[in-house]
Amino acid sequence: MKKVLLAASAAALLAGSWLAPAQAEYLKEHRGGTIRLLARSAAGTLDPHINYTDQGWQMYQPIYDGLVAFRKAEGVEGFSVVPDLAEALPQVSNDGKTFTFKLRKGIKFSNGQDLGLKDVVASFQRIFKISGPTSGTFYAGIVGADKCLADAKSCTLEGGVVADEAAGTITINITKPDAELLYKLALPHAVILPADTPAEDMGSKPIPSTGAYMISAFDPNKGMTVSRNPNFKQWSEEAQPDGYPDVVQYDFGLSEEAAVTAIQNGEADWMFDALPSDRLGELGSKSMDQLHISPLSAWWYAPLNTRLAPFDNEKARQAVAYAVDRNTLVKLFGGKVLASPVCQVLPPDFPGHEDYCSFTKNPGAKWSAPDVDKAKQLVEESGTKGQKVTIIVEDTAISRSIGVYLQSVLTNIGYVADVKPISSNLQFTYIQNTNNKVQMSVTQWYKDYPAASDFLNILFSCASYREGSDASINISGFCDKDIDAQMQKALDLGVTDQKAADKMWAEIDRQVTDKAPAVGLFTPKRLDFVSKRIGNFKFNPQFNWIVTQSWVQ
Amino acid sequence: MRGLGAVTNRGRHIPVSSQVAAMPRKTRGPWAVAFAKLATDRAAMASLAVFLLIVLACFSAPLYAKWAGTDPFASTLDAVIQIDGADVPVMEQSTEGLGLGYTPIGPTWRLGNYFLGADSQGRDVMARLLYGGLNSLLISGAATIFTLIFGTLAGLIAGYFGGVTDTVLSRLLDVLWAFPIYLLAISLSIVTIAQGISIGPIEIQSGSLWLPIIIIGIVYVPYVARPIRGQVLALRHSEFVHAAINLGVPGWRILWRDILPNITTTLIVFVPLMMALNMLTESALSFLSIGVQPPAASWGTIIQDGQALLYTRPLVALVPGLAIAVSVMALNVFGDGLRDALDPRSKVRLGRD
């Protein structure tokens, strides 16, 4: 007990000395108050091992910690992985298949329990015991994961995640080298929870946390209260910095229009949902200093089903890619400030991205204008003219308008098209399931972590296609053995030479784009509207606005 | 005497009671009396005129679009129109500050040239309003016919044959009646919206106007069937029907020639009232995007489109709302006038005048 106390006070001392002067001073000056956030609805379950939403992941940042974390910083820096609950980045041995972490000492959960090695082992088991949404993908490479995937209840990850109490280390063994393992460990699905957390979806029940804050109240219909974790002592400013506000109050239920008004009146500080498009003009001119525009690593695209007529024909797919006017889509999304035209898969400034556009007038690096004549000619050549196409879109204003626009494009180049809007809650799974025979749809993909494979391998590999499943993320059903082999090579190469691998990914990006299994529509940007009193707004490219690094007083 | 008289008058569509009232004025039949009364009802006639005007305008939708040279179903975000010789883009980009967002052009108040402005797809709202009205009228009209046919059939059969037939039919109608109308309509629409309906040889594709027509038609059947059944039940036990049965007239002939003519007035009164109800239901379903499917329009879908523009271009939502309100009000006032004119009791009063 004494030892622990000593360690804790030593850690506290150390933490104090680590504070950069700027942060220390700012903390004194601006510390306190309540940040009030708004969203139309809660982000689903509170369980960080299960929740797979932007909204949830953003709020977990000041609350939960993994062995490693994405740096809480702006710009490209925010894509780098830093040690969090581990003292340092892991020692890699055994040809890149063994990662050894030394756990920090003296960290406590918000309920007063000490963080120990058993919590780490239990947390990794829990990912599988609750059949986490990414257990079969991100973490399937851990030794013993195959057994856990087959029988979740009795998961031990024997030989995969090993604790050494004497040395205070955790060793993670994987079946083959994985250049992206640290990214995966830095995601909320791999955060460390108390070992006695039940192996079931905790739903609306907050789980004790190690971060600077903890969830102190939650009602999915009303809101969430996040307050300071009384047991928190800062150990790493870049991984888990102390925050400014004492409380973050997140309220659910207000419509977007009402939320804008609340922020204008200073009754709230920020809203999660996209700003209503008919308020953009007004806000852009009257409240410029309250708006923050940030790039997103995301892709709005229209998957074309390569296994159904007419898009089982490559020329028919290319025709659509030629005919779509990206400028019109950008207009529909709110203009050039909020989106940019795109016709390849990897978003700008993303690993492996090299400007490329084949489906445009004057093919080259960038998209310039649609080539409708070429499109009509391709439809003619493909022999698919006059066929019926149904476009499945989400039942939101923006998706519906994109659907209606794409319908006029298809009609123009010779198809008989109609649009079917489906409730946003269902559309994403509906378009994945091959039983629904979806020919064309409109959807979005946001990166999980900054690696080209997170777009190309996940969206267009043969393994991502599962017949009759709601989780068949390769919506186009695209499967090209040659491209698949190249992706595997690029993944392997990434372990030793990331730069060379990214070059390979750029080439794969070009090949996939040329085959047109999906039509790239545009790259969106994030527009944050904050109240006048919010200071120190910082946007992290991985998890968006770093809420608790802003102050309100 | 009266019973016998009714028997001899079989097939002349004359309610027994009204014969007595009409007797003193030998020159005018009951229909003439009713129309004369209706013609003097200024509110009803004005409503009828308003409604007919709306119908006429909506049916001219294709002509209007052709004349205006606009395609109300295609996105025209890049369109540029001329106003007083100046080129104006249909979607105006905000130029102040950060230059965020596009706003569709507002009303130009020039017929044939974005009279009511554009919606978020840059389409002419006026043209869409007329086309939307056409769909709303077609759906509510066809659904009314559907409801009346099936409601009357159910009411006639249940009321006339009684016994087990009545029990089964009435309970079936009760089940339908037990659901809140909108809940039932929404549930049916959601089930059929994605896949359409396929029953034996009948196949209705999703997106077809027949889907909302049938759904709205079905949910209101009990509203018509119940009062009709009541009336038929009363008529079934009237002396002239007993007489006809005793004379050996077959059942279907009694239904067709004695009973149906006697409920015609009720059915006529139902037409405008049901149409008003159907119009509201159709708009509600389309507003929830489970009625008319894009890019086709109905007043409900235009309101939905306009909802996203409520702040900058409120007219896009307001005008179709107003169109629904005016149409429904006109139909209701006219329906009231029609009922006053055809209601036997009011005719008795007319006779005493």
Image (tube, grey):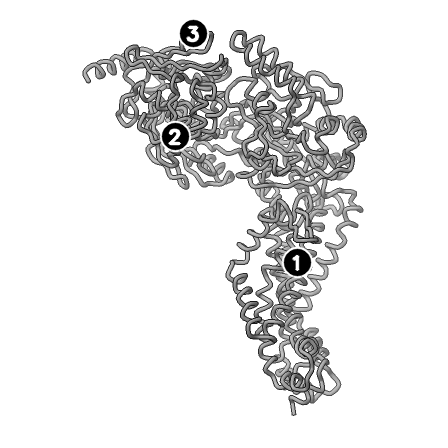
Quarter of the figure with residue A437: top right
Q: CA distance from mark 2 to mark 3?
A: 31 Å
Residue A69 in the image, given as x and y percentages of width and height: 42, 18
Picture layout, residue B152 above or below residue A83? below
Q: Earlier in the sequence, mark 2 or mark 3?
A: 3
Circle 1: residue type: Ser
Q: Which numbered circle lies on residue A93?
A: 3
Q: Which residue is mark 2?
A: A153
Residue at left offset 66%, top offset 72%: B41
Quarter of the figure with residue B106: top right
Quadrant, the C terminus of chain B: bottom right
Q: Is residue A549 left or right of residue B96?
A: left
Which residue appears farthest toward the left when viewing the image? A2
Mark closer to the observer (1, 3): 3
Specify the subunit that label 2 lies on: A
Observer-nearest residue: A481 or B31?
A: A481
C-beta proximity under 8 Å, tags 2 and 1: no
Q: Which numbered circle lies on residue B350?
A: none
Name the element at disc 1. Answer: helix
Q: Which residue is mark 1?
A: B140
Quadrant, the N terminus of chain B: bottom right
Picture layout, residue B56 above or below residue A448? below
Q: Is residue A239 left or right of residue B201?
A: left
Name the element at disc 2. Answer: loop
Specify the subunit that label 1 lies on: B
- Is the residue marked by circle 2 packed among few (<14), some (14-19), or many (20+) residues within 10 Å? some
- Is the residue marked by circle 1 packed among few (<14), some (14-19), or many (20+) residues within 10 Å? many
Residue A28 in the image, given as x and y percentages of width and height: 32, 20
Q: Is residue A550 visible?
A: yes
